[in-house]
Image (cartoon, coloured by chain):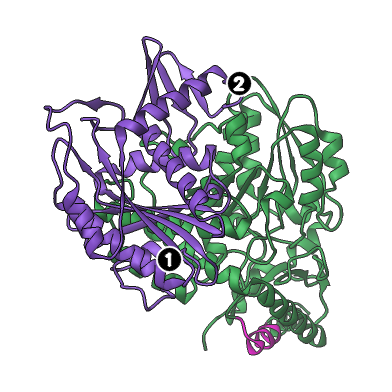
Chain colours: A purple, B green
Amino acid sequence: MTTLATYRKPAVPPRVAPLLETVSTSARSALLVAGGYFETTAGIGEFSLNSLTLALETGAAARRLHRGNKVVYDVIVNDLGMSCSDDVCTLPAAGPATTDVTPLTEMAAAAGTSLTVTRERTLRNRAARAMKRRLREPAEHPLFVRDGDEILFRSRQYEKVLAGVVKDDHVVPRCPLIVAEYFARYFARLRAAFPDCSHRHVIDVNSLADRDKVTKGAEIYLRTQADPDEEIVLVFADAACADPIALPYTKYDF
Amino acid sequence: MATIYLDHQATTPPDPAVVEAMTFAATHCYANPASPHAAGIRAFREVERARGAVARLIGAARSEICFTSGATEGNNLAIKGVVTPGERRHVVTTAVEHKSVLDSCRSLRAGGHEVTVLPVDAEGRVSAHQVAAALRPDTALVSVMLANNEISTVQPVAEIGAVTRAAGVPLHCDATQGVGSLPVDVRALGVDLLTFSGHKIYGPKGVGVLYVSNDLSDRAPLAPLLHGGGQERGLRAGTVNTTAVIGLGAAVGVLAEHRAEESVRLAGLREQFLSTLAELVPYELNSGTGPGFLPHAVSLSFEGADAQQLLLEVTEIAVSTGSACNSAAQEPSHVLTAAGLSPERIRGSIRVGLGRFTTEEDVVRAARALAAGVTSRAVGAA
C-alpha cells in the first residue's frame, strides 16, 4: 500500500504493517485483535472471513514484534438485527436468531489459536444500564447531556454524536455507545488477563461503512474510561481486506 | 549568479521533503478526506498524521488543531471567533502585532467593541505587568505575538499567560514568526489560542494552523467565520486542503528534528553577516541579537539612506524594508514607529532574515553587496 510513513519493521507482512505501526518492539504489549464481524441476519460472509484472516495475520505478526507480547482474538456478532446510518437505526427483515460460528472458530484453530465471540445484544444491554447510571448523576458525567429524548455526547471530533435515546424511561443505546461498550470490555479483559504488559492495544477491523460509528465509539471510550497506556487502532477495509487502512487513537488525541 | 534570498521572515522556500510529500499527496491523496470510501479514508489518515505532527510540535492534542488557509485566517478566526458572540467586549493587544491581528481588532472596534493597544518599549516588548493593568471585567481576549516579524523581539508570552490564566481571560498568540526558531509548548506558554502558517517554516503557502485549547472549546466554542460542511469540528467549513496539509506535516517533521541546532547555526551566520558588514559600512541595529530576540533575523538602518531605493539597486540579494505583507502600503513601519525610531532611521531600515539554505558564503556576499550599494549611493549623493 502507499503511505508516507517509512515502516521500521520489515519483518512484518506489508498488509498488516500499518496496523502494528504503534506497537512497541522493546516492551511487552497486550493486544486484542477483533475481526470476523458479521450480522446474524446476513450470516458469515466475505468480509467476515477475510477480516478474521487479517486479524489472525495481524496477531501472529504482533507476537513476532516482541517475544513477551500477548494476543487474543474476538469476533463481534451483530445479533440486534439493526443496520445503522448516522442518526437512525432500521430493522431489516428478520433472519435466523442464532448463527453457527464454526467456520470462524475453525479458522482460528487452523492458525493455532482460539477466539471469543461478543454479541451486540449483550453489549447493548450493558451500555443501557451504564448510561442509566450516568443519567442519574449528570454532574459526574458531564460529557453526556440529555436533550429531550436524545442523549448526546460532547464530541471533540464531530458536531453531533447521538449516544442513545430515552423511550418510556428506558435507555436505548445507539451504535457509538455500543461500540464504546465493547472497547470497555476488551480493555478490561486485557487488563485482567495480562497485568504485566505495559501497553494495551485493541486492533479493530471494520467495514469502510462503519467508519463514523466506530470512530465516535472510540472517542467515547477513550475520553470516559481509558487508561493512558491504551490505544485503539481502527482498521477500515473493504470485503476483500486487501488494503486495510489503520487509524490509531489514544486519549491524548482528544 | 543566483539571488541570495535573505527574506525568510516574509516566506521560506519549501523544504525538499515538503515538495516530496506534496507530490505524493497530490497524486495519491486527492480524494476528499470526508468521503466514506477507501480513498477518502486514506486521505483522511494522512491529514490526521499531519495533525498529529503539528500537535506534537506544540504540545497539544490532535483534537485541538484546526487547519486554516494561513495565519491571517487563523488570527481572524481566533480574535473574531472569541469576541463576536454576545455583548460588547474588550480586547487587549500590542502595537507591534501583525496587521492581521491589528486589523481584526480594528474591525471589532468598528463593530462596537473596545480595543486597548498596548505600547511597547524601545526593544518592541510589552510586559506582563502592562497586560495585567489593561485587563477589565469585560475583557474577552488578550492577543500577543510570540516574536516580531520586523525586529525579532520575543514577547514574554509565558509571563503574560500566567496573568491571563489567573484572570480567566483567553490568551491568543500569533506564533507565526517564532515557531520556526523557538520551542513552543502551548501548556507552558499558557495560551488558549495559537496561530502559525506553513510557509514560514519551509512548508506550503495557503495552509496554517489554529490551535484552540479544548478547555476553551468546552467553555465557549469559537464562532466560525465560514459556514458549510462542518469540517474541522465545525470551526472552519470547506474541504480540507489535503495536499497543503500533508506538506505542512512534512515541514513540521523536519522542523522538529533540526530546530535547535539550526537556530544556533543561524545565529552564528547572522553574527558573521553583521561583522562583515561592520567592516565595510556603518549601520545602526534596530533589533537585538541576544537572548529575547529571534536568532536568524536582524533589522538595521543605514544613516541617510533610502532603503527602498537601495534594495532596488542591490539586485544580488532579496531582503525587505519592513513587513512584506505591508510593504505595498508605502507607509512607515508601524513596528519601528511603535519602538520609537525616528522617521529618518525608519526610512533607512532593512530587515535581513537568514534561513535553512543560507550559507557562510551567502552572508559574506550579501554584506559586501549591501555595503557596496550604500557606499555608491552615498558617493552619488555627495
Q: Could you confirm whether marks 1 and 2 are on the same chain?
A: no
Q: Residues within 10 Å of mark 1 (few under 14, many from 20)?
A: some
Is B361 colored magenta in this rendering? yes
Residue B266 position by quadrant: bottom right
Residue at 47% of width from left, 20% of height from top? A132
Is A112 colored magenta in this rendering? no
Q: Answer above or below: position of B247 versus B226.
A: below
Numbered range of the magenta stretch: B358-369
Q: Answer above or below: position of B140 versus B341.
A: above
Q: Chain of mark 1?
A: A
- Residue A244 versus residue B275: which sits nearer the camera? A244
Residue B270 position by quadrant: bottom right
Name the element at disc 2: loop
Residue A137 position by quadrant: top right
Residue at 78% of width from left, 69% of height from top? B301
Principal secondary structure, stretch drawn in magenta: helix
- Residue B240 versus residue A113: which sits nearer the camera? A113
* Image-based side of B221 in relation to B50, left or right: right
Residue at 25% of width from left, 59% of height from top? A108
Amino acid type of disc 1? Glu
Q: Chain of mark 2?
A: B
Task: Give me the C-alpha separation between circle 1 and circle 2.
Answer: 46 Å
Residue at 46% of width from left, 72% of height from top? A67
Q: Which mark is residue A21?
A: 1
Amino acid type of disc 2? Gly
Q: Quadrant of the N terminus of chain A?
A: bottom left
- Residue A29 versus residue B73: which sits nearer the camera? A29
Residue A18 image point, x, y percent: 37, 65
Q: Which mark is residue B86?
A: 2
* Image-based side of B58 in relation to A50, left or right: right
